[in-house]
Amino acid sequence: MLERLWLARVAEAQPLFVAPLDRAIGYVGLALVGLGATAWQWRQSRAVEWAVLAAFHLAALALALVQLRGIYAGTLLAAPALAALIAEARQRGPLVLAAAWIASAGLVYPALGGLAAPKPEAAQCDGGAVLAQLAAQPAGTVAAPIDLGAYALAETRHRILAAPYHRNAEGNLAVYRLVDLPVARAQAEAGRLRIDYLADCGGAWDELGAPPAGSLRAALRAGTPPEWLTPVAAGASVYRVAR
């Protein structure tokens, strides 16, 4: 369930040709340019060192076909050839040098990928607002969307049930199951898990599909949270859990 709902959506765990175009460009752009520069250096010098480096580049690219995280090594291996490219560009004038620097800048490729990113959907999670609401509350245990977990750990005093770590299967599953339980059973489950706060936001848990009728998630989406959930402030999307 977690692999289907969450891990398959994690960028670095996606195969290259399955990942959205913006992520693919951001992950492999610099490595591909480095591979091209390495091949150019080998063509110019026929030195075996460049051929060996290109072989490692290709191995990293092959790993990225399975999971994008495989390209990390290819990005590191791009440095020697890109440095050589910049050194040669110095002899050809400022415009060529500027182009070489831009091609070698890792931040360029995520920015280019961002241009190809789809427009965000209407329902978006305002993570900053949720974290601010949480930070203002006394320390407790929070059930929140998985992707908010790491930020909440870093920026608040709370304990977090779900967070984007694949070894946290028990906590992540617990939150998924909690929000889809019938309202009365969800209160009992929140008590069993000793949850003090429930954090919600636009688009949270949409990967679960349409909320089951009578579930806690359905009540939240309808704007009618149960009596045992009290907003921490007027209009807040963080609720204090009555146990």
Image (cartoon, rainbow, N blue to C red):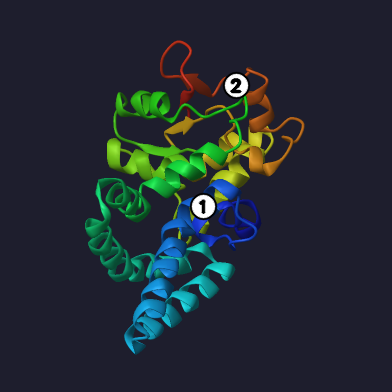
Amino acid bearing label 1: Ile
User: Which numbered dot is residue 25?
Assistant: 1
Q: Where residue 39 sits: x, y (%)?
A: 43, 74
The disc at residue 55 is none
Q: CA distance from mark 1 to mark 2?
A: 41 Å
Q: Amino acid at mark 2?
A: Pro
Q: Residue at x 49, y 58 (%)?
A: 12
Q: Can you see residue 194?
A: no
Q: Is residue 166 left or right of residue 38?
A: right
Does 207 sit left or right of 28 as displayed? Answer: right
Instruction: Reply above or below: 84 against 98.
Output: below
Q: Is residue 197 above or below residue 27?
A: above
Q: Using a 10 Å C-alpha cutoff, classify the residue at mark 2 as few (fewer than 14 neighbours), some (14 to 19) or many (20 or more).
A: some
User: Which of 9/237 is in front?
Assistant: 9
- Is the C-beta separation of discs 1 and 2 under 8 Å? no
Residue furthest to the bottom in view is 48
- Relative to 119, is 240 on the left or the right? left
> On residue 225, which mark appears?
2
